[in-house]
Amino acid sequence: MEAIPITLSEITKEWVAAQLNTKNLTGIRLEPMGEGVGMMSAMAVVHLEWDNKTQGPNSIVIKLAASNETNRNVAKQFNLYLKEVSYYKELAPMTLARSPRIYSADHDEQHNFFLLMEDASEYRMGSQVTGADLQESKMCLDFLATLHASLWNKVDDIKWLPNMSKSENAKNMELGCSAGWPQLLEFFGEFVSSKINSKKNDYLNSIASLQAKLDRAPRTFIHGDFRMDNMLFGQKPEHDPLMVVDFQGPLKGNGIYDVAYFLGHSAQTEVRRENEESLIREYSKTINNQGITGYSFDQAWADYRIAILYAWTVAVVIAGTMDPANERGFAWMSKMVERNSRAIEDLKCLELL
């Protein structure tokens, strides 16, 4: 097997042609993308030139391992690249929740990987800095209900997919939260509630318990990084209304975690405050309408408060251990921390510790 490219500069016409299984590619041109958005990967649009006899896509997108060593080490620690390749190969065909078509994908033991995927650059990418409005929030939660229902009670035997609790991933989250809290305060302290910070030790001691509560059956596939920068909204009649990308942090556990992660990190604060109850009621209803029984609104709401509180662990790990890299990265991390902090206070989640 040909070696996996390490950097975008190593992408050649011959390599792309081999991945697409064609001899009719006459040229390529790379256009790097995603600064401040794709924190864990390097990405580029690959413009394709074909001979006169061939009709292929005008462009595709390539995704490689992060070039930033700090962020790449986080990816290694959590085995992110194996998970993303495995999702697209094994689980994407099992759900109607739309993600880009994959032309070729692979990974190796050195934590290199690549995805060659459908170019969705005509779609509008969501902005975590701006935050989701009500319409976008409804679309995203409807997507989650479809994704979760598709894989409800079907994930327990998937070995590469870690459990929310009692897994290496869970322990790394616990350790990362403890290690990352000082950097969180150094760079993002103005966005951290004093009430949360005063409960730091209680919070750190409760992480394993929160994970266990979100790992009770029934389990489903959790996207794990369901935020606005990973949302692609259709702009033309032929587009899907919503496509979602970046399946590097999936888990198995309670799907409400994705809901809380999105509303607590990406939804505009006033949108969440005014609509979260109705949005979760609709999520529960949609789950049950797709053949899943027994997940009531009352249970979903109780789980949601737990998940909002646990989402703080992820906020601390991201903001406290990763390199923001640039102004755009700092901006969305700031919003993530600020929104999650406010959600925890609004919902009185510290009472759950």
Image (spheres, rainbow, N blue to C red):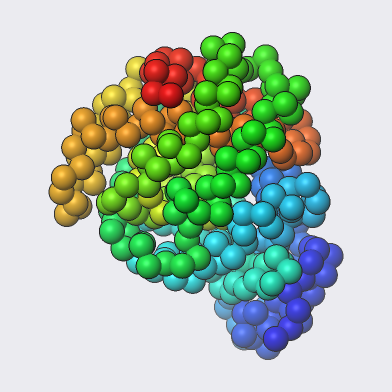
Identity of the residue drawn at 67% across and 61% down: 63
Query: Is 222 on the left or on the right of 317, as rendered?
Result: left
Q: Residue furthest top?
A: 194
Residue sitting nearer the eye, 7 or 242: 7
Identity of the residue drawn at 59% across and 65% down: 82
Give the vertical position of 288 relative to 51 (above or below): above
Give the vertical position of 45 relative to 293 (above or below): below
Q: Quadrant of the C terminus?
A: top left
Query: Is 226 on the left or on the right of 276, as rendered?
Result: right
Quadrant position of residue 334: top right
Residue sitting nearer the eye, 137 or 224: 224
Give the vertical position of 130 relative to 295 (above or below): above
Q: Quadrant of the N terminus?
A: bottom right
Q: Position of residue 207 (x, y in %)?
A: 50, 35
Identity of the residue drawn at 56% across and 37% down: 314
Quadrant position of residue 23: bottom right
**Residue 232 shows up from this direction:** no
Q: Position of residue 95 (x, y in %)?
A: 35, 61
Identity of the residue drawn at 65% across and 71% down: 107
Q: Position of residue 183 (x, y in %)?
A: 74, 28
Query: Is 255 on the left or on the right of 247, as rendered?
Result: left
Residue sitting nearer the eye, 269 or 353: 353
Q: Position of residue 180 (x, y in %)?
A: 69, 33
